[in-house]
Image: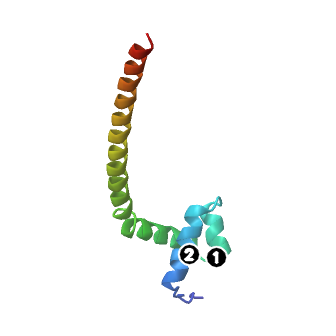
C-alpha cells in the first residue's frame, strides 16, 4: 500500500530542526515525537546547516574578533599606564 506524501510548512521544518538541535533527545526520538521519519529530519538538518550556518557564524566570529582586538588594545594601554603609575608612586614613597 503506497504512502501518501505529506507536505510540511517551512515553519514546521524550522521548528523541527530547532528542536532536534537544541534538545537532549536523539534525533530519532525527536522525529518519532513529531511523527516524521528520522531520514526526513536528518535531511532537513543538513539543508538548514547548508543554508544558514556558513554565512551567519562567520560574520559573527569576525565581528567578535574585531571587538576582542579593540578590547585587548585598551586593556594593554590601561595596564601600561598602571605600571607607570605604580613605578612613579613607588619612587615618591622612598
Foreground disc of the pair 1, 2:
2
Q: In the image, what residue occupies the spot 63% across and 68% down?
A: 30
Q: Where is residue 85 drawn, in percent x and y? A: 38, 25
Foreground of the two, 53 or 2:
53
Left or right for 16, reference 90:
right
Q: Quadrant of residue 46?
A: bottom left
Q: Which residue is mark 1?
A: 34
The mark that comes first in sequence, 1 or 2, is 2
Q: CA distance from mark 1 to mark 2?
A: 10 Å
Left or right for 55, reference 27:
left
Q: Where is residue 4 drawn, in percent x and y? A: 56, 90
Q: Secondary structure at mark 1?
A: helix
Q: Identify whether 69 is placed above or below 49.
A: above
Which disc, if any, is residue 15? 2
- Color scheme of the displayed model: rainbow
**Disc 1 crowd, CA 10 A, few/some/many (<14, 14-19, 20+):** some
Q: In the image, what residue occupies the spot 37% across and 44% down?
A: 71
**Disc 2 crowd, CA 10 A, few/some/many (<14, 14-19, 20+):** few
Q: Quadrant of residue 81?
A: top left
Amino acid at each position: 500500500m503506497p504512502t501518501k506524501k505529506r507536505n510540511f510548512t517551512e515553519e514546521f521544518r524550522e521548528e523541527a530542526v530547532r528542536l532536534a538541535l537544541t534538545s537532549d533527545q536523539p534525533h530519532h526520538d525527536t522525529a518519532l515525537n513529531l511523527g516524521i521519519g528520522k531520514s526526513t529530519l536528518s535531511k532537513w538538518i543538513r539543508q538548514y546547516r547548508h543554508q544558514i550556518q556558513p554565512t551567519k557564524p562567520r560574520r559573527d566570529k569576525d565581528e567578535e574578533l574585531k571587538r576582542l582586538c579593540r578590547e585587548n588594545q585598551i586593556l594593554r594601554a590601561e595596564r601600561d599606564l598602571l605600571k607607570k603609575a605604580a613605578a612613579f608612586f613607588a619612587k615618591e614613597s622612598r
